[in-house]
Image (cartoon, grey):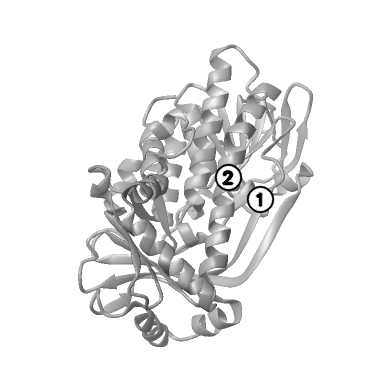
Amino acid sequence: MIESPSSRPCVYDVLIVGGGPIGGLLATLLAATGLEVAVVEAAPPEALGRTGSDSRAIAIAYTAQKVMVAAGAWTDMEPEAGAIQEIRVTDAASPLFLHYDHLEIGDAPLGWIVPNPVIRRAILAQVIAAPTAHLFAPVRVERLERLPGRVEAHLSDGRILCASVAVAADGRPSPTREAAGITITRRDYHADGMVCTIAHEKPHHGIAHERFLPAGPFAILPLAGNRSGIVWTEPRKRAATLFALDDAGFLEQLRQRMGDFLGDITLDGPRFHHPLALHYAERMTDHRLALVGDAAHGMHPIAGQGMNMGIRDVAALAEAIVDARRLGLDSGGLQVLQRYQRWRHFDTLLMLGLTDSLDRLFSNDTGPLKLARRLGLAAVNSSGPAKRFFIRHAMGLVGDLPRLLRGERL
């Protein structure tokens, strides 16, 4: 529910700073167990899922979709979601390739591609509908005091919110993380990701294409109907030149990289571009504070795992908090936060290292590396056990999974 202005102190179980998809998803899941959750968001609610505000096509892995179902948000997403039936990975013009097919391990899709505004609207609707989730927006946290037994958030409208634990879900800049003194390691890729949605003449048959070009990865991601999301990486100066083209010029450059296998293409909405960088927090917890999503980590979009890693954070933190409450423990206590830190630390570093290594390996045109990576793609493609492992990894089925990712209740 959206809270009306009031200056009286309010007491909640969990305080979430940031009402985007990750913060909203956590709020919805916790509220479903009866916890009182406050969500503080600087943007007005109507702006969070506005059409045309973001053209990113977001990959939702098989296990991450289970969390969306548990939150009640998948029903609104499904009509706009394109199922990933196959993934084809190629290196420039090489005849060697890697091909994943969902039928190699079962009947379920490998994942889904969903427009980001659709995700935002679906999750926001669940936050507003949840009786014990309280959305404070538009308002900012001016000061967060983390005391021995609670946190106190002093809001820009004068209200004071109290809770057992605070969660930073306020994005890459994360004022909450910065105020806590948690340092960040960053790597600038000196490249931009250009994103757009296209409509095309021929069906995509649920096939996601990842093409490694010398300038960077180029992805064609299947959306619902004859539409696809484009994620196109170029060095920053080159990306600025391409983005400055009019729609006709941009489409011509796009056709040169895509080919004509989807027939005639047109832009279906605005274009956007953003700088690419890696970052990760030295730790994901502090005294009565947990970091989730982009506040904790951000990675190259080369494997489409950014949102999925945030959803894994949510599933792990929700389980740690709910289990503690059922045992009568302090949901913001050291034991809960240590459990979350241990659970997510290795998985996060592994994925950050994987995406960074893939970028270093494929975003160049060095002869020996080019030969090695092409032979590597072919070797994995011809090895049944190795391919099945990587398929399971792409679906989010590898590792110590929280209950929500396994399709179980909290």
Q: Nearer the viewer, residue 395 or 230?
A: 395
Report the residue at 34% width, 66% height from top.
Answer: 97
Q: Amino acid at mark 2?
A: Thr
Residue 302 to residue 25: above or below: below
Q: Which residue is mark 2?
A: 348
Instruction: First in sequence, mark 2 or 1: give its number.
Output: 1
Real-space Cα separation, disc 2 to disc 1, in angstroms = 9 Å
Q: CB atoms at circles 2 and 1 under 8 Å apart?
A: yes
Secondary element under disc 1, as helix, strand or loop, is strand
Q: Which quarter of the image is occupied by the C terminus?
A: top left
Report the residue at 52% width, 71% height from top.
Answer: 369
Which quadrant of the view contains residue 59? Answer: bottom left
Kindly tell me whether residue 131 is visible in this rendering. Answer: no
Report the residue at 32% width, 57% height from top.
Answer: 382
Q: Which residue is mark 1?
A: 280
Q: Amino acid at mark 1?
A: Tyr
The percent position of residue 91, horizontal first and vertical second, equals 41, 72
- Using residue 223 as the reference point, say whether residue 300 is left or right of it: right
Would you call the spot at circle 1 few (<14 residues within 10 Å), some (14-19), or many (20 or more)? many
